[in-house]
Image (cartoon, coloured by chain):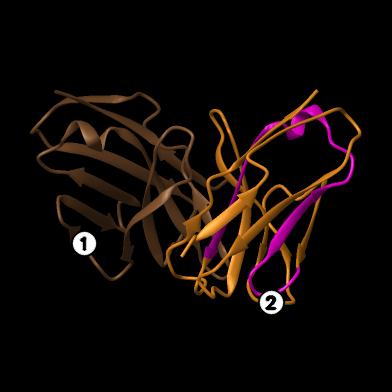
Chain colours: A brown, B orange
Amino acid sequence: SQKIEQNSEALNIQEGKTATLTCNYTNYSPAYLQWYRQDPGRGPVFLLLIRENEKEKRKERLKVTFDTTLKQSLFHITASQPADSATYLCALDMRGNNRLAFGKGNQVVVIP
Amino acid sequence: NAGVTQTPKFQVLKTGQSMTLQCAQDMNHNSMYWYRQDPGMGLRLIYYSASEGTTDKGEVPNGYNVSRLNKREFSLRLESAAPSQTSVYFCASSEARRNEQFFGPGTRLTVL
């Protein structure tokens, strides 16, 4: 069966350090992958999209990698700040139809 | 621009009651989506509309119907609510299939 796995345990990290989140998937062959941020009580907000032929994408303090051989994406927040505390969702294109499949999300807590 | 708006924000229903969740977007997007989000389950797609006049089932369509009223509006109807439909419902839109999705603030529905 198809699975998207994100760590269910919250990541607690000291302010200023780099937070790294993992998104692993099985039985998918996505053409692209997206990352979203979700704050409590709010809808997800798009952060980054990376395509299958791209190894790395950056936006300000955010960096995403995409390894289609390992079936894994890594999401990095450098110089983390308390305002980065949120849940981060990865989403995979389900190739061939109009759908995104979302992971359950991984919470990040940045400690001042 | 308001982005994606949803009404109502909160709703409590009794088992067997019906209701319609409203969603509208002012970004001239072609595609619109309805998701539900349950603790520990992540976002699951209920229905989507790739363009005005078309709708398709997602991962969990049973118990729901949708209407793409025009390009701006996409409504979700529960004909006979069940406690299993207690959830947070998010509407989203995107310019095209492979673009980022913009989410509304959500509707928190409780079915007693």
The disc label shown at residue A57, or none: 1
Query: Does A37 appear above or below A110?
Result: below
**Residue sitting at x 67%, y 51%:** B59
Q: Is residue B99 left or right of residue A21?
A: right
Tell me the amino acid under the disc marked 2. Glu
Q: Position of residue B107 (x, y in %)?
A: 63, 41
The chain letter for the residue carrying disc 1 is A
Label pair 1/2, CB-CB below 8 angstroms: no
User: Which residue is label 2 attached to?
Assistant: B52
Seen at 23% across and 55% down, the residue is A65
Magenta span: B69-93
A60 or B10, nearer to the observer: B10
Cα gap from disc 1 to disc 2, whole angstroms: 33 Å
Q: What is the secondary structure assignment of the residue under circle 2?
A: loop
Type of amino acid under label 1: Lys
* Residue A31 against residue A90 in the figure, above or below: below
Q: Residue A23: x, y in percent?
A: 35, 44
Quarter of the N terminus of chain A within the rendering:
top right
Residue at image position (51%, 74%) is B96
Identify the secondary structure beneath mark 1: strand
Q: Residue at x 91, y 33 (%)?
A: B16
Q: Residue furthest front?
A: B1
Question: Toward the viewer: A5 or A9?
Answer: A9
Q: Is residue A13 magenta?
A: no
Quick one: quadrant of the C terminus of chain A? top left
